[in-house]
Image: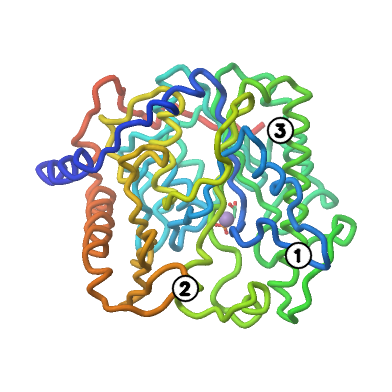
């Protein structure tokens, strides 16, 4: 109902976090390159197998002066996996508790980041080496306002260079470069990687890293595809530098969701060196977030702020010098002093700097001692309220009753993603 949007507005207005002055506009006018890091969990960072780093490139990127790495960043996805993460990033709203919001709510009205950027002079595109209908992307992207969708038809895909869901990350990044070089700037380009995907198998010719030896084949091979992804990303950064696009771009790299499910707790206990109980399992939902701004010299490379995918839209828009107070957002700018550090996960668990609410139990961080539920009660209430309000917006298609000023409603019929 139309009147329901008022309660949402009251909440999101009260929740709004003013930009951090030092960060606002630092990337104004630059290209934005998002990389969705398939199945990448934070425990991979600086992890070594047989004395070798699994992800040497990402480890070095983490120490780079131009990078801020968030070590307490969580995925908030549900059954819609990759597409849920895309939804969170585009809308700063939660995906649904069941099913895939991309599949069931693509006809809703959105005020998505692609549309916002488009209306601020950006060309907006997605690059992905799978078919365009997977997760109903070709329909949802029109509602979010993406100008271009470079799906598998834009690439030379052969038996030799593809595996599992599609084109492998190295040839895919490489073949994407000419499209980017031709693109009008500034652009926002989202790269959805694919090779580091369950069940983490890879053709032998592409394996250049040992498997782990827990005896659980999913966990063991996870390191090989992660290493391949790390090499693919390094190649991409080098090609961005060669093309001259690197200096004019900011990079936002984030893990889309977990890769290792709870079915692999025994092997994971071996990997992380402690028992994977309910508490540890929730802590493992951390995914990396890298914000890399060539030319910047940040004081601190590691940022310990707690946050999640819901927070990315306001964070990035503020970096680009775009105010967000008129957009309905459930997340807040990670760099803001008013940032909200209560992180609701989609299954209802809640993580904060001090406590983790898991199921109906409350634990203190970082050691996971169980404490009285009282300690979690207040944050839990806030988190559940936030999820509920967000769900109301999606189920009720409530954004159709709200029009931010300076924003033109998206008409999906204006978009057409042609096969090449
Ligand atoms: C499919 C790719 C993987 O196109 O995005 O999807 P996932 O299974 O990770 O949601
Ligand atoms: Mn995924």
Element at label 1: loop
Q: Which residue is mark 1?
A: 201
Residue at screen point 61% across, 40% down: 191
> Where does label 2 land, which residue?
367
Residue 326 x %, y %: 25, 29
Label 2, label 1: how far apart the Cα atoms are: 34 Å
Location of residue 211 in the rendering, given as x and y in whole percent from the top left corner? 80, 69
Closest to the observer, 325 or 342:
342
For the point 33% across and 66% down, the residue is 348
Q: Residue at (74%, 79%) from the top-left corner?
A: 214
User: Does the closest atom of ligand 1 sit within 8 Å of the Cβ of label 1?
Assistant: no
Residue holding disc 3: 176
Q: Is residue 28 visible?
A: yes
Badge 2 local density, few (<14 within 10 Å), some, or many (20+)? few
- Which is more N-terminal, label 3 or label 2? 3
At a point 40% along the width and 44% down the height, the residue shown is 311
């Amino acid at each position: 109902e139309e009147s329901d949007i008022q309660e949402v507005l009251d909440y999101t207005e009260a929740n709004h976090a003013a930009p951090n002055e030092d960060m606002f506009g630092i990337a104004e006018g630059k290209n934005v390159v998002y990389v969705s890091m398939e199945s990448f969990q934070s425990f991979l960072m600086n992890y070594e197998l047989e004395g070798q780093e699994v992800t040497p490139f990402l480890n070095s990127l983490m120490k780079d002066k131009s990078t801020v790495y968030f070590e307490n960043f969580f995925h908030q996805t549900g059954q819609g996996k990759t597409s849920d993460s895309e939804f969170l990033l585009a809308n700063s709203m939660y995906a649904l508790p069941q099913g895939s919001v991309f599949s069931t709510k693509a006809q809703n009205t959105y005020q998505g980041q692609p549309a916002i950027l488009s209306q601020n002079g950006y060309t907006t595109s997605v690059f992905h080496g799978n078919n365009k209908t997977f997760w109903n992307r070709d329909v949802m992207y029109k509602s979010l306002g993406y100008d271009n969708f470079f799906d598998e038809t834009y690439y030379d895909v052969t038996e030799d260079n593809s595996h599992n869901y599609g084109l492998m990350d190295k040839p895919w990044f490489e073949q994407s470069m000419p499209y980017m070089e031709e693109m009008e700037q500034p652009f926002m380009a989202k790269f959805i990687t694919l090779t580091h995907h369950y069940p983490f198998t890879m053709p032998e010719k592409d394996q250049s890293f040992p498997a782990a030896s827990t005896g659980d084949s999913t966990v063991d091979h996870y390191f090989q595809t992660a290493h391949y992804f790390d090499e693919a990303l390094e190649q991409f950064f080098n090609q961005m530098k060669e093309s001259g696009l690197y200096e004019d771009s900011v990079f936002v790299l984030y893990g889309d969701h977990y890769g290792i499910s709870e079915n692999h707790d025994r092997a994971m206990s071996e990997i992380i060196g402690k028992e994977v109980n309910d508490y540890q399992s929730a802590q493992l939902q951390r995914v990396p977030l890298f914000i890399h701004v060539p030319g910047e010299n940040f004081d601190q490379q590691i940022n310990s702020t707690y946050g999640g995918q819901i927070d990315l839209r306001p964070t990035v828009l503020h970096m680009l010098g775009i105010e967000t107070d008129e957009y309905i957002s459930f997340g807040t700018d990670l760099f803001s002093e008013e940032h909200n550090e209560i992180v609701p996960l989609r299954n209802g668990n809640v993580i904060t700097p001090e406590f983790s609410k898991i199921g109906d139990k409350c634990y203190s961080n970082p050691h996971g001692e169980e404490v009285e539920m009282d300690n979690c009660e207040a944050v839990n209430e806030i988190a559940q309220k936030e999820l509920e309000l967000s769900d109301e917006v999606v189920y009720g298609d409530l954004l159709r009753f709200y029009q931010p000023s300076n924003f033109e409603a998206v008409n999906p019929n204006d978009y057409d993603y042609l096969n090449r």
